[in-house]
Amino acid sequence: MDGRRRRVSRSLFRFYNAFALATVLAATGCGGGDVGGVPVAADSQCPGDGCAAVRCPVRHRDDACPLGLVPDACACCPYGVCGLGEAAACNTADRPCADGLECVKTEDVGGGVQYRCACKETDPVCGSDNRTYSNMCQLNEAAAELGHNATQLRIQYRGPCQSAPFIRSAPKNLAGSVGHTVVFDCEVNGYPVPSISWRFTDTYGITKWLPGDDTLIAIQTRGGPDRFTVTSWVQIMEFKPTVHTGNYTCLGSNSADVVTASALLDVRKMV
């Protein structure tokens, strides 16, 4: 009876071990071919030479893996392998992405499929160097490049660093035809996202804010075309030289500063 129990126990042990191994292989792609009837992608296979070609990083060396160690799905390295940074070619076996990134499928210019590391976070962050990074992964990579001075670069807060507004596209001087439509446009970038207002100074030096009480003038403002940019237009629906000739000023402002750009509207000369 005891012998029979031992044989049953060994059989169950071998079954559980085989089941666990199949589960690991299916998850990591180790071994290649079909696992459980599901084909394994070639770029996810573990090395077929028994890890002989894999160079394991030295754990105690700070420069061995600037972005840190990540678990080795193929069990080739006792402490894991070096995590890869953004846009690096990756797979789920021996080329894993660093913490905070994931291996995603992309298409190259020729239409082929590739796998690249992409940051899980897409929002910008402000670094302690007062520089805006497109995401947290970019900041971590910049810190890793500093080596022993990496602690000097850290996140200040999520979101872009505060920046004074600047004119991306200024209004241009125009010559209008009597009775026709005239349009000025202005783009301003900054963080916090600026607001835009318009000011008009006529030929007598009198200044007023637009649109004022002129029913022939309309102002439109919207966000874009890029992030943290705002665009505004002044539209004169029926140009009257005695009323509308003068200087039009775009003012972009946020909590950091105010920036201005001006353009002149004159009468188109008849040839």
Image (cartoon, rainbow, N blue to C red):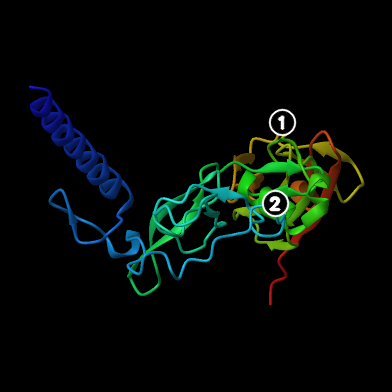
Residue marked by disc 2: 186
Q: Is residue 135 visible?
A: no
Residue drawn at the location 64% of the way across and 49% of the way down: 134
Q: x, y percentage for residue 162?
A: 79, 40
The numbered mark at residue 256 is none
**Residue type marked 1:** Asp
Q: x, y percentage for residue 66?
A: 67, 56
- Element type at marker 2? strand
Is residue 85 left or right of 4 when viewed as pictured?
right
User: Dot 1, how many residues are within 10 Å of its Cα: few (below 14), some (14-19), or many (20+)?
Assistant: few
Residue drawn at the location 44% of the way across and 57% of the way down: 76
Q: x, y percentage for residue 21?
A: 26, 45
Q: Quadrant of the N terminus?
A: top left
- Viewer-side label of 1, 2: 2
- Element type at marker 1? loop
Q: Where on the picture, by quarter, is residue 113?
A: bottom left
Q: Is residue 43 visible?
A: yes
Is residue 16 left or right of 109 when viewed as pictured?
left
Q: Between residues 171 and 135, which one lies in front from this camera angle?
A: 135
Residue marked by disc 1: 213
**Residue type marked 2:** Cys
Is residue 155 left or right of 135 when viewed as pictured?
right
Q: Between residues 203 and 131, which one lies in front from this camera angle?
A: 131
Is residue 271 left or right of 81 when viewed as pictured?
right
Q: x, y percentage for residue 75?
A: 42, 52
Q: Is residue 203 above or below residue 155?
A: below
Outermost residue, front side: 2
Residue drawn at the location 8% of the way across and 28% of the way down: 4
Disc 1 from disc 2: Cα separation: 22 Å
Q: Where on the picture, by quarter, is residue 163?
A: top right
